[in-house]
Image (tube, rainbow, N blue to C red):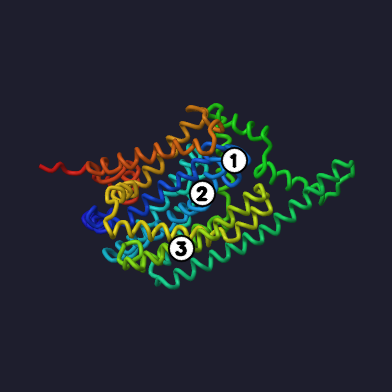
């Protein structure tokens, strides 16, 4: 039995260096670094992610920073990472199904994602409330039965979920409009001394909750800033409030439909050979052209609408209807450009460094949280709320440079990043070799 278990582990063990798909690693590395472009706002500013008027500056370079990233990165990098994760599902399960019986492959898949979800829980409460490991791990559990589905139905199913999400966003926009209208009317009635009905009191409460989180006053912003700059217990408390809200979403909540849809499409794209760079140069050029045409048009319009309305809540809500279409288009365009670079061997130093970052994606992702929480939280340098939006990117660029340099060097001597080593060892119930053999 021991020998059998060992043979199964050898057959289904972590992918060897020579079997890796370099183009997929490059895209994963790009997505991982890109995610920090948006996460940094949550690490360093309160209520500024979608609305720069709340904190961090909303004029000049700060406004342009928001506009450019809204068009090219906001949601797009998370979408790209979800696509790559979906591709990884097929890569993992295909290897397991081909080399062993289905049960052992399912066992490995289950452990891998349960450990990822468990790591996500710790990561969320201790370092970063906006983390993605927990939703990725839990959502991936439901996708195992879809691994043998053909590319076309996978793509159709993923697209259908995007349409459902868009419909939900439209419904939410209508409800938000009603909530704001009734809430503001209740405020005026209260100011005039009119006794509010039970329905009007409810409308007032809902409006105040929405306003507090979406349009906080400077005093409310500073109050939250102080919590993040406080003691370790203050920080853990304010962080846990956000985690509790996100982790209690229903499995079928629109947030998870977002993850499901992009993972399913990523699974389809992998089956079509898109991520493995097997399609023609012309295919990737056309994919990029179409993606940027659609995405830049939609996202530029939504950016203009929000800015021209001074980030009015109703206008911002309605611009979310095309959100997933716009971000998927840009994400696919980014994929096209990256794989064109890989196939043409252009900027080889950059694509190889991105590939190394992608190979160590989990370690690098956790490093983002460790560094940023130390810089911005009270148990570190307490810089939360002290930097303007554009200044946050000095931190981002510094982290990028270090990881682009360190990751390739690390992989010269080690098979995995430290987090990947722990994850794989737990997944396969066997300590993985860490250090590479010294060549003589």
Q: Nearer the viewer, mark 3 or mark 1?
A: 1
- Mark 3 Cα within 10 Å, few/some/many (few <14, many 20+)? many
Q: Residue at x 34, y 68 (%)?
A: 282
What residue did someone put label 3 on? 291
Q: Residue at x 26, y 64 (%)?
A: 99
What residue did someone put label 1 on? 59
Give the vertical position of 148 relative to 12 (above or below): below
Farthest residue to the left: give it. 440
Q: Residue at x 83, y 45 (%)?
A: 188
Mark nearer the N terminus (1 vs 2): 1
| Image x and y of residue 440, in percent | 10, 42
Mark nearer the N terminus (3 vs 1): 1
- 71 or 354: nearer the viewer: 71
Tell me the CA gap for discs 2 and 3: 17 Å
Q: Confirm or deny contact between disc 2 and disc 3 (CB under 8 A).
A: no
Numbered disc 3: secondary structure: helix
Relative horizontal placement of residue 39, taking residue 349 as reference (left or right): right
Q: Residue at x 39, y 57 (%)?
A: 84
Tell me the CA gap for discs 3 and 1: 29 Å
Relative horizontal placement of residue 10, taking residue 186 as reference (left or right): left
What residue did someone put label 2 on? 68
Does any portion of residue 375 appear in the rendered image? yes
Numbered disc 1: secondary structure: loop
Snapshot quadrant of residue 108:
bottom left
Tell me the CA gap for discs 1 and 2: 13 Å
Mark nearer the N terminus (2 vs 3): 2
| Image x and y of residue 343, in percent | 28, 60
Q: Confirm or deny contact between disc 3 and disc 1 (CB under 8 A).
A: no
């Amino acid at each position: 039995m021991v020998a059998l278990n060992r043979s199964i582990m050898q057959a289904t063990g972590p992918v060897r260096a020579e079997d890796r798909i370099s183009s997929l690693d490059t895209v994963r590395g790009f997505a991982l670094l890109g995610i920090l472009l948006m996460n940094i706002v949550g690490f360093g500013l309160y209520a500024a992610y979608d609305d720069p008027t709340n904190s961090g500056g909303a004029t000049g370079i700060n406004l342009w920073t928001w506009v450019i990233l809204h068009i090219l990165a906001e949601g797009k990098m998370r979408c790209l990472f979800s696509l790559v994760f979906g591709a990884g599902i097929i890569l993992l399960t295909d290897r397991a199904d081909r080399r062993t019986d289905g049960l052992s492959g399912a066992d490995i898949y289950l452990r891998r994602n349960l450990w990822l979800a468990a790591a996500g829980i710790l990561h969320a409460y201790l370092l970063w409330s906006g983390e993605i490991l927990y939703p990725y791990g839990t959502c991936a559990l439901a996708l195992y039965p879809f691994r043998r589905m053909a590319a076309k139905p996978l793509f159709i199913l993923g697209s259908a979920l995007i349409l459902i999400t868009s419909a939900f966003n439209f419904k939410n926009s209508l409800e938000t409009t009603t909530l704001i209208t009734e809430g503001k009317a209740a405020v005026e009635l209260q100011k005039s001394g009119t006794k509010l009905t039970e329905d009007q009191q409810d409308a007032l409460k809902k409006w105040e909750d929405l306003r507090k989180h979406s349009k906080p006053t400077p005093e409310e912003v500073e109050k939250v800033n102080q919590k993040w700059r406080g003691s370790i217990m203050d920080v853990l408390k304010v962080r846990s409030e956000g985690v509790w809200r996100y982790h209690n979403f229903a499995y079928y909540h629109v947030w998870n439909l977002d993850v499901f849809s992009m993972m399913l499409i990523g699974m389809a794209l992998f089956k079509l050979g898109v991520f493995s760079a097997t399609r023609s140069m012309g295919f990737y050029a056309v994919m990029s052209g179409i993606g940027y045409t659609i995405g830049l048009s939609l996202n530029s319009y939504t950016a203009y609408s929000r800015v021209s309305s001074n980030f009015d809540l109703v206008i911002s809500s309605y611009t979310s209807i095309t959100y997933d279409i716009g971000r998927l288009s840009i994400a696919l365009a980014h994929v096209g450009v990256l794989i064109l670079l890989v196939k043409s061997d252009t900027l080889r130093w950059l694509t190889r460094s991105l590939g190394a970052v992608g190979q160590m994606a989990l370690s690098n992702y956790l490093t983002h949280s460790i560094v940023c929480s130390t810089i911005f939280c009270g148990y570190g340098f307490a810089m939360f709320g002290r930097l303007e939006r554009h200044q946050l990117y000095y931190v981002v660029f510094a982290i990028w440079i270090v990881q682009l340099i360190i990751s390739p060097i690390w992989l010269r001597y080690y098979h995995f990043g430290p987090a990947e080593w722990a994850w794989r060892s737990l997944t396969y119930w066997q300590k993985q070799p860490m250090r590479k053999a010294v060549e003589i």
